[in-house]
Amino acid sequence: MPMPGKNTEEQVKQGTIQTVKAWGDNSLPPTLLATLVTAQHFRPFQPLPMIFPPILLFSTYLNLSGYKAESAGVTSAWSALYMLLASRRKQQFTNKFGVRGVVRGATLALCAANTVGGGVAYAFGRSRED
């Protein structure tokens, strides 16, 4: 029996998985990602990237309706797709440190976190059965 003050390796692994799963089960990350995508592509309006915010907001709606595992799967898939499409756009080195570059970097980092967190939550989550 381990001491209460000490963490074993198994407890640390379990805690990490639970933290990542909690990120995927949360309704805030897809809403934040939809906001960042809209901030980047609304002016000037770009139709293809603006497909993502309504789908991410629908994922938030699913999460709040009780379909947490399904919402995590939708968030993970669409975040990965946006990350793939956004990483294909090339950016000059000097533009990476402006406001737009910081927003783009934050968006891609949030996409990566949503992809991992949503994937874990979808894999370990339970589907809502009617």
Image (cartoon, rainbow, N blue to C red):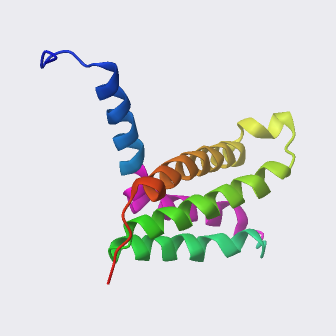
Q: Is residue 35 visible?
A: no
Q: Residue at x 84, y 34 (%)?
A: 93
Q: Residue furthest bottom?
A: 130
The total of numbered circles placed on residues is 0
Left or right of 48: which side holds 111?
A: left
Res 34 → quadrant: bottom right
Percent position of residue 10, x then y: 33, 26
Q: Quadrant of the C terminus?
A: bottom left
- Decide: is 26 above or below 64: above
Closer to us: 40 or 32:
32
The extreme front residue here reads 1
Q: Magenta span has 40? A: yes
Magenta-colored span: 23-44
Residue 62: x, y in percent?
42, 75
Q: Is residue 118 visible?
A: yes
Measured from the top left, where is residue 24 in percent x and y? 44, 54
In percent of the image, x 38 and y 58: which residue is there?
A: 25
